Image (cartoon, rainbow, N blue to C red):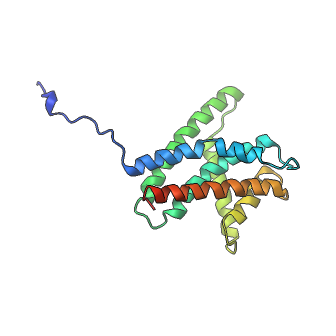
Amino acid sequence: MKMDISMQQPPHTEKSPVELAARDLFNFAVAREDIKAVVAALHPNAQTPRHTIEYELAILKIISVGWSLAYFLEHSPHKTRLAENFWAAIREFSQTISSATGLMTGQDIDYFQILKDRLNTYVTAMNERPEAKEPAAVMGPEFARTCGVADDVFTVMAGARLFIGTTGRVKAYLEEVKLR
């Protein structure tokens, strides 16, 4: 049977505003410029090794973007689809990180599971402090605890600074693209 090719529709490749937003937010979540700026501004007396702070800030940034979607889009009809697309991209990114790390170290890691565990840690910390007026008041200290130096004010401030900057930029972006 011969098909008339002229009657076939080309595959739909144009992305919806939600898909574009998920892509943009993924790209922002994995970008490192602001992380490097926070590490560069870290006080010299900080007790946490810079490589630990940089590693944990990368995790904090990704989960802060994901948390922001749930928080800022609480009543939006776009919340579920945007979050699903964002986390699917993060899952794919995590598989790449896990594979590369496994090849380099000879040990299997599951970066996506690390992200999920950290997200649960931060959400639990926020749930345990409902009296906190701002999420950053919980996130900064929890970040320092995660880094192994709960009482280091400079590490607390690094985590809080990245969290505030990340959530602020996500909020502004969602308002700009009119998804909020």
Quarter of the image for residue 161 reads bottom right
Question: Which x, y percent locates residue 107?
Answer: 69, 32
x and y percentages locating residue 108 in the rendered image: 66, 34
Q: Position of residue 120 (x, y in %)?
A: 64, 57
Residue 145 seen anywhere in this rendered image of the structure: no
Residue at the spot x=65%, y=26% of the render? Answer: 103
The location of residue 75, given as percent across then percent down, is 45, 67
Q: Name the residue at the bottom extreme.
A: 131
- Left or right of residue 106, residue 7 in this image: left
Question: Residue at horizontal 57%, vertical 53%?
Answer: 65
Residue at 52% of width from left, 39% of height from top? Answer: 92
Q: In which quadrant of the rendered image does the N terminus lie?
A: top left
**From this viewpoint, which residue is outermost toward the right?**
45
Residue 96, above or below 179: above
Q: Is residue 100 visible?
A: yes
Q: Is residue 52 above or below residue 101?
A: below
Residue 27 in the image: above or below residue 102:
below
Q: Residue at x 60, y 49 (%)?
A: 62
